Image: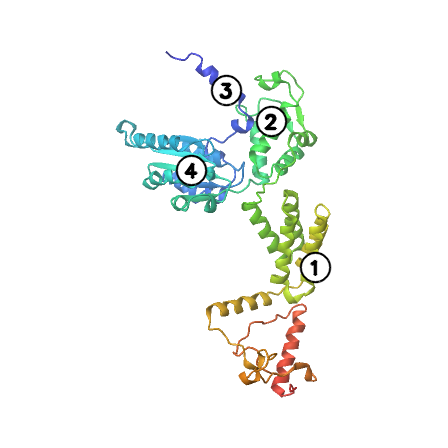
Amino acid sequence: MADLWADQREKLLKTAEPLAVRMRPQTLDEFAGQTHFLGPGKLLRRMLEADRLTSVIFYGPPGCGKTTLAEVIATVTQRHFERANAATIGVKEVRMVLEDAVRRLTDPAGQGRKTILFLDEIHRFNRAQQDVLLRDVERGTITLIGATTENPFFAVNSPLVSRSQVFQFQSLSEDDIKTLLRRAIADEDRGYGKLKLQVTDEALDHWAVMCDGDARRALTGLEIAVLSTTKPDDERSESSGSTEAVVITRAIAEESIQRKALEYDPTGDSHYDTISAFIKSMRGSDPDAAVYWLARMIVAGEDPLFIARRIAILASEDVGNADPRAITVAASAYQITERIGLPEAQLTLAQAAIYMATAPKSNASTLAIGRAVSDVKNQRTVPVPKHLRDTHYAGAKKLGHEGYQYAHNSEHGYVDQDYLGVDKTYYEPVDRGYEKHIRQYMQWLASLSESGDDRA
């Protein structure tokens, strides 16, 4: 028997959907952002236009359109679409989806219709669960679209990644967000086009910034602002009987969206990417960038001692003897951070980070130890020259441990003698900072050796 109320129920369900769901794009042209792979002539766009979509993995932060694009792709390709979340679906259900996909593909009446399996949060599948998909993905029985906020090269099985094209999503730009908001304000069917709604540019700017590239948060902010400033009858009616426009100001916008929560997993990509940016900013002598990335980590709750350790490593690795005081600053910063903790320690960490960023740079010491360690591991072991060996025991001279010249017996505090046994240079000071003086001093020592004025 036909369901006489099906359309009515569907209409009621639609009215209950949040604005972010109602405003999901229905075509590729409506989709905002990700032009680096979805723009005209780009890889994914070409694959879709040629109907040659293979299994893909969508990787990126929340709210950037991974799920939305998967649904648009299902519509564009006219393929059967199965949607599941890896956190709630088990292996048994996955096997049923795969079996149905095979039947659908081999059914003559269905003309070999292909199936898209959209698996959200694919990183939540363990390795064994991911392996269930391998055979059908490899054979092309299904087209897998996996979505994840975790780096797939770490969170997804290597065989599955190798059989899929990885597309990295970026957070939406402020202009992208404002475009989506304006579309929702003007759309009469899915948005608020039937309301006499005026949203100030300042309100749009606030949502675009505070959503942090998350379209869902921005649209939710708009929805809360509208719901809190309009009457239910006004919002649901075809045309409001009131002649007075509803104005959404920045003050209303500020109340409608919570303070942004930083995307920062202390064990994931955000942790490693941010500390990498912090280190590279100090190395690149940009104190402003260094302080910004430091603030990002502090606000997100990063371990302050972890930050202090990285500053200490950089003091030796990248500043080195170009400024020998840097390592002292780093050691003090670590000790102070350990003793007083946050929030006060942010002052110490900022001072140390700025010192490192503005210090002259040299990695000569880093290169020197790297070369020496490589030689120790890979070259023949160099014996200690006899004149440098220990002589503090009876019989040392009988073994030939003699001939050492005491440097302080020379008026220059230096004598030209062999301290290594092979002709090798590891340390090559640069011509910057204090290391410039080290370089000059070493050149002076070399001149003493050449002139013969180096005798003890």
**How many angstroms separate mark 2 from mark 3 (CA)?**
17 Å
Check if mark 4's residue and mark 1's residue have beta carbons within 8 Å.
no
Q: Earlier in the sequence, mark 2 or mark 4?
A: 4
Please state which of residues 230 and 281 is positioned toward the viewer in this rendering.
281
Please state which of residues 345 and 197 is positioned toward the viewer in this rendering.
345
Residue type for callout 3: Leu
Q: Is residue 239 visible?
A: yes
Left or right, 126 with reference to 244? left
**How many angstroms separate mark 4 from mark 1 (CA)?**
50 Å
Q: Position of residue 171 (x, y in %)?
A: 55, 41
Tag on residue 329? 1
Please state which of residues 7 and 415 is positioned toward the viewer in this rendering.
415
Check if mark 3's residue and mark 4's residue have beta carbons within 8 Å.
no
Dot 4, how many residues are within 10 Å of its Cα: few (below 14), some (14-19), or many (20+)?
A: many
Q: Residue at x 48, y 67 (%)?
A: 377
Q: Is residue 284 visible?
A: no
Q: Which residue is mark 3?
A: 13
Label 2 secondary element: helix
**How many angstroms separate mark 3 from mark 1 (CA)?**
62 Å
Q: Which residue is mark 4?
A: 145
Check if mark 2's residue and mark 3's residue have beta carbons within 8 Å.
no
Which image quarter holds the N terminus? top left
Q: Position of residue 181 (x, y in %)?
A: 58, 32
**How many angstroms separate mark 1 from mark 2 (CA)?**
51 Å
